[in-house]
Image (tube, rainbow, N blue to C red):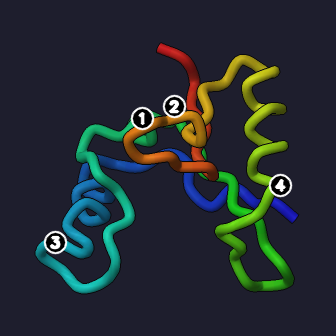
Amino acid sequence: MFKVTSGNRTQAEQDALYAQGRTTKGPMVTWTRKSRHIGGRAIDLTLFSGKNPVWESRHYDRAGVVGEDLGLVWGGRWKKSPDKPHFELPT
């Protein structure tokens, strides 16, 4: 089952995520302070098996095709840093 795990963020929330793995503990989870999540123009859809997130699955590729068919930009197509759970409105 897919669930929306992230949507609209404040700049402070994005800054905290950006600091993670750099100046605070934890793994790096973002490469930008200027996310489309700020202002509510992006979501992350995470696949779950029970209560556990699943990060590697062919189901992300299918979800990406569906999202693109709906006119969304899918992060799974990004060459530098693919982000398969990420979808955003086009600019």
Q: Which residue is mark 4?
A: 59
Give how far apart the Cα atoms at labels 4 and 1 are.
Answer: 23 Å
Please state if 35 lies on the left or on the right of 90 as rendered: left
Q: Answer with mark 3 or mark 2, whichever residue precedes in sequence.
A: 3
Tell me the amino acid under the disc marked 3: Arg
Relative vertical location of residue 40 with respect to residue 15 in this rendering, above or below: above
Please state if 15 lies on the left or on the right of 48 as rendered: left
Q: Answer with mark 4 or mark 3, whichever residue precedes in sequence.
A: 3
Q: Which residue is mark 1?
A: 36
Residue, far front: 79
Give how far apart the Cα atoms at labels 4 and 3 are.
Answer: 31 Å
Mark 4 or 3, which is nearer the eye? 4
- Dividing the picture into quadrants, the one containing residue 16 is bottom left
- Dividing the picture into quadrants, the one containing residue 68 is top right
| Contact, mark 2 vs mark 1 (Cβ under 8 Å) | yes
Give how far apart the Cα atoms at labels 3 and 2 are.
Answer: 25 Å
Image coordinates of residue 60 in percent, x first then y, are 75, 52
Q: Answer with mark 4 or mark 1, whichever residue precedes in sequence.
A: 1
| Contact, mark 1 vs mark 3 (Cβ under 8 Å) | no
- Identified at 83% across, 79% down, the residue is 49
- Identified at 31% across, 64% down, the residue is 17
Image coordinates of residue 2 in percent, x first then y, are 81, 59
Q: Which residue is mark 2?
A: 41
Q: Front-most of 61 and 21?
A: 61
Q: Secondary structure at mark 3?
A: loop
